[in-house]
Every structure is written in C-alpha cells, then in structure tokens.
C-alpha cells in the first residue's frame, strides 16, 4: 500500500469535517468521546506523546504514532506542520488503520483488528436503531395470541368462569357497573338555582356622600 493513499485518506477526513488537527482540538474531541483514534507524528516531542497518551485514556480511544513527520502531515493537511490529530468517524478510522496495517503489519495489525471490531459494533447499533425507528413509524402491532387447544382446556365445571372463558379463547367480561354507572332520572336531579345579574354583589351603604345636599 502506497504511503500517499494514507495521506489522501487523512485529507478526505479533513474535508469531510471528521479530523481535528492540533493539541487543543484533539483534546476536546477526545474528552467529548468523539475521537476514534489519535494520530501522532513520528518526530513529535516526548511531551506531545505523553499528552496524546493522556488524551487517549481520557477519551477511551486508540492512539498511534504514524510513519510520517510533522512536515509531511502538514503538507497533506494544508498546514505548516501537524504533530497530533484526531479522527472522529469510526468508518474512516477503520479504513485508515487497515491501510496502515497493509503498509506495516507488525506495527498496526493489532490496532486495525481492534478498530474493525469497534466499527462492526457501531454498524450493528446503527442498524438496530434504524430498525427501531422504522417500527415506530409503521406502528408495528403485537401478534395475536393463539387459541388454546381443546386438550389443554380445563374440564367442564372446573375453575372459575373467567378461567373457563379464557381457556375457550373468549374475551374477559367485566362488570357493567364499572363502565356504566346508574344516573338518577332527570326529574330527580337537583335543579340549579336561578341567578340574577347582581346575585353576588354586595349592598352599597349610604353615607355622607351618597346623596346631594339640598339648598335651603
């Protein structure tokens, strides 16, 4: 596998918005559990390597040292130099590690297998979620219960009436009183009192200012 194919896949991830470049964006993606794999340049400093490893532990993701220098990664990604980057799509991460495993099986085969397992589980979860949403949209109904065979039905006279109806495949009956409560006839119902317009108003008390003073 040509090295340029790996770099072109990184460029494709960047154009698709699935690649975070730099320490701060990579750390933010890892802590948000969005990073699938952290990529480190081959000539990155030891402090950068320790920080990359710390980011991977915080985000529960893989981290790898690439066979490319900071300048090579920078030219492929349109930057001056790139020491660390994070791939945030599981499918692109799986494809990238497969290409790296073909390039150097001894260094990347194990990581490629782990990423392939994560990609397969993610695809299964996505398929289950799509099937669930499809069932919700269609309003999937429950299957009807099969009638009880005659040989498994209880003998006549045994059990309660509800058990016999259930064994016969009939729907259970409920008391009519629970559904229809008896109401008194219209003549026996209390009639509402007639209300006048000012039924709830309070009487006004006459005081000194309640009438005009007559001139003598």
Image (cartoon, helix red, strand yellow):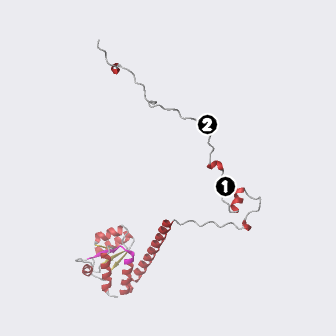
Residue 110 shown in magenta? no
Q: Quadrant of residue 213?
A: top left
Q: Which mark is residue 173?
A: 1
176 relative to 44, above or below: above
Q: Quadrant of the C terminus?
A: top left
Q: Please name the residue shown 32% across and 88% down the image.
A: 2
Q: Which mark is residue 187?
A: 2
Q: Position of residue 147 (x, y in %)?
A: 67, 66
Which of marks 2 and 1 precedes in the sequence? 1
* Neighbours of disc 1 within 10 Å: few (<14), some (14-19), many (20+): few
- What is the secondary structure assignment of the residue under circle 1? loop
128 relative to 73, above or below: above
Q: Which residues are magenta?
A: 82-92
Residue in the foreground of this view, choosing between 195 and 83: 195
Seen from this angle, which residue lies furthest top? 216
Residue 85 shown in magenta? yes
Q: Quadrant of residue 141?
A: bottom right
Q: Total label count?
A: 2
């Amino acid at each position: 596998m040509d090295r340029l194919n790996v770099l072109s896949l990184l460029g494709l991830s960047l154009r698709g918005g699935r690649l975070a470049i730099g320490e701060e964006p990579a750390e933010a993606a890892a802590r948000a559990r969005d990073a699938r794999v952290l990529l480190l340049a081959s000539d990155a400093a030891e402090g950068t390597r320790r920080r990359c490893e710390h980011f991977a532990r915080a985000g529960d993701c893989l981290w790898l040292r690439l066979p490319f220098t900071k300048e090579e990664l920078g030219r492929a990604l349109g930057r001056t130099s790139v020491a660390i980057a994070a791939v945030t799509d599981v499918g692109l991460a799986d494809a990238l590690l497969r290409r790296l495993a073909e390039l150097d099986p001894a260094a990347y085969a194990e990581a490629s297998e782990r990423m392939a397992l994560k990609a397969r589980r993610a695809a299964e979860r996505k398929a289950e979620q799509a099937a669930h949403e499809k069932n919700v949209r269609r309003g999937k109904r429950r299957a009807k219960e099969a009638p009880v065979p005659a040989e498994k039905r209880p003998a006549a006279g045994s059990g309660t009436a509800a058990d016999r109806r259930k064994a016969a495949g009939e729907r259970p009956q409920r008391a009519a009183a629970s559904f229809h409560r008896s109401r008194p006839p219209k003549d026996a119902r209390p009639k509402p009192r007639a209300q006048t317009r000012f039924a709830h108003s309070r009487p006004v008390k006459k005081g000194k200012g309640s009438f005009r003073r007559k001139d003598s």
